Amino acid sequence: MEALVEDVTLIFEEYPICSSTDLDHKLQSVECASLFVTDENRFIFSKAQVGQEAEAHFNIYNASCLPCDVVLSIEPLPGEAKSPINNIFKLHPVKMSVPGSSCAIATVTFTPPEEQNYNCTFKASLVIPNGSVEIKPQSLTFTISGKGHEPRVTVVCPSARSKRGNAVLRFKRLRLGDSEMLPLVIRNDGIIPVKFMLHLEDEHRMFSLKGRASAVKVFHNGDVEQDSAGNESKPTKPFFLLNRGQSAEFDAIFKPTLAQRVERQIGVLVVDTYSNKTVIELVGEGHEDEFTLDGLEEGPEERNADGSLKENITDAVRVNHIQFGDCHVGEPYCRTFTITSHAEMVMRFEWEAEAPFRFSPKVGHLHPGCAKDITVTLMSDVPVTFRRHLVKCKVTKINFELPQRKVQDWDDQMTIVIWKNSTRKDPAARWPKIQKVVKTAPEPAHTVVEKSRQEVEVYLSAIVAYAQFHLDTIMVQFNNTLPSQTRTATFTMHNTGEAALKYSWEKAAETEPVKEPYSTTLMRRFLTYDTMKHRRKLLSLFWWEQDHLPETPPKVRQLQQPAKQQQDSEQQEEQPEQQQQEQQEHSKKLRRSKEKNLSPKRANSSLDVFTDAMHDLFSISPYDGTIPSGQKQTFHLQFKPKCTGNFKTALLCRIPNLEPTQKMGQVIVKGSVQEWKNLEEPLVQMEEGQGPKEEVLWKPPPEGQHLCELEHPAGAGDIVPSKDDLPLLTRDVWSCPPKLQEHLYLTF
């Protein structure tokens, strides 16, 4: 009987057990610090930190009733005898005595000196007493692997880096008492969990940190002890824990109390690696300017530290930029900001701007504690690009000759209206004519205070350009399409200009369907009763000729009579035959006159009569939008016909701000629709002037069904069915002379 139990679930009962196929999934687990792989017979230290000791415990079970001695050892892998494992893997104890039906615990420690893989072989051998013959030699053997990992803490936000390689938080230039808050995000990008804390030293307390509820609820400031030499020792407060892939979010706040540039640092301290801490630089500036600009934007590169580094000095963010964006040639664009006076004296300002920029007001006065809106207008008749175009404003302090309380506010947009007598005299008028004269208000008399001149800078950026595009397709052809079948095609438009391109699609006004006959079988399935009723007058194009009235069966003539004549039909039958013929002749003349007025030309296409069928024939998506400069947009064109025939349309792309020499975008779309093969055979279509190739006998409709609409010259109206009675008729019609065969396809 074997003394040592080889059941891995008992030996490694403290650790997860998996196969190699599940190994990657298990290693991603937060709780999994070590595990055993059955098919590899290998125990793995999965989250050991470099320089830190990781410990594992293995159970050595004795299955017999008698105690036994076991010798433990750790050896290099076969073929790797020179592999250094001393002081990396340690075993305790090296020999143990296991009581009967009990177990003992072997402890293995793993201390990786570097970030690399280490392996060894663990062996537990049963000691056989001298002279014992019944006990057989037995041993437990498996491989132990481990890798050292360094804690990896990454500052995700801010993304800007200084020339020293540190993350840098750049705050705006703020007036004393104002504040700004910026996000700070720290993430664990390593394998092992990380314990860290943030250390900020600021004797003036202009910077502060605040933990967000979604990440860290408590934050400790300045909790690192220092020895007499200034070296940091172990922190006195607990750290925050980040598992693999987790992030901690904080808010960094700057509230200046001094009018100067301020620079501080945040140290990210990781447990047991104080000498290798991560540094986050904080830069801000407080000011007490007497003339300020409000409502401006940051430049696109202001938050990037590289854009303001001068001899390794990072400046605070200056908010003095106006971004016009993409502008059309010849169109005005306006932006507005505010100037404010914080001085105790009146200040005079004057903008030194040139075309195509115009400041309004350009010159003016600003009284103490007052503010004034400034509008900047850009309009250029030629394409031009401005990138941080500098405009300066001269600001001086002034004194009025009169007491300040008696002087009103002034700028060059203020006017005075004067009514004066006209120089032109009307001899007939008793009094001279009065005309209105508008003048710019004169600037109040003043003197400039010496050494009070200063300059304020504003940067302007804009792209004034024509829209330019390229279409890779100018014609789309849909062939062999069946009714109610949806066909889709795609084409691409490329914005080749410097500015964003706005577009919208529409159908050309001259769009027409190609004139082709259509299918009666399909049309009577897709045309609704309301459409038929709406187009009833147009159906007079297909009335029967008066000469063939006797060939029409009496029952059909009865169906074609108007509702009013049907109510009086019995009275008409009682009238003399000669009187009925006179009424029929009169009806013929009225019918011919009506046909002449309503039918100036013959319709050869189904869509000429039923124009509603053209709706939703072609559609494009997206219908409108904007394409950024240098980008492409793919359009999806859909063709969904409801009847047979050949169709053609032109899709126009409305693009504003096109160059005068560039034409509007246009895509020609054609579609060909054929009959369903599995429907009943279509009627024989006759060319004009030819006789019928076959004769179709008329049959009355089945009982309970009616003709949708039927008109003839002798009839004075039609019988209109209700929506419930609207039938799907078959191909049964009456025979007609050759001259009328070309209209047969419109008969229901």
Image (cartoon, grey):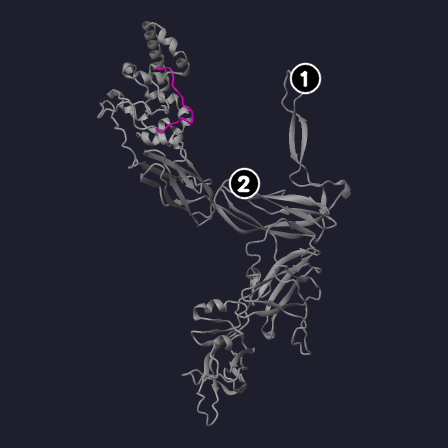
Residue 527: percent from left, percent from top = 38, 29
Q: Kindly state the secondary structure of the residue where label 2 is placed.
A: loop
Magenta-drawn stretch contains 30: no
Mark 1 crowd level (few <14, some 14–19, many ≥20, 10 Å Cα): few
Q: Kindly state the secondary structure of the residue where label 1 is placed.
A: loop
Give the residue pinned by disc 1: 430
What amino acid type should be assigned to the residue bearing mark 1?
Arg
Res. 488 image quadrant: top left
Label whose residue precedes the other's in the sequence (1 or 2):
2
Mark 2 crowd level (few <14, some 14–19, many ≥20, 10 Å Cα): some
What amino acid type should be assigned to the residue bearing mark 2?
Pro
Residue 164: percent from left, percent from top = 56, 68
- 646 to 81, vertically: above or below: above
Q: Main secondary structure of the magenta part?
A: loop
Q: Which of 99 and 471 lies nearest the eye of the viewer?
A: 99
Q: CA distance from mark 1 to mark 2?
A: 47 Å
Is residue 109 rendered to the left or right of residue 647? right
Q: Which of 61 and 195 lies nearest the eye of the viewer?
A: 61
Magenta-drawn stretch contains 720: yes
- 681 to 299, vertically: above or below: above
Q: How many marks?
A: 2
In front: mark 1 or mark 2?
2
- 445 to 163, vertically: above or below: above
Give the residue pinned by disc 2: 332
Residue 391: percent from left, percent from top = 59, 50
The residue positioned farthest toward the bottom in the image shown: 131
What segment is highlighted magenta in the picture?
A: 715-728
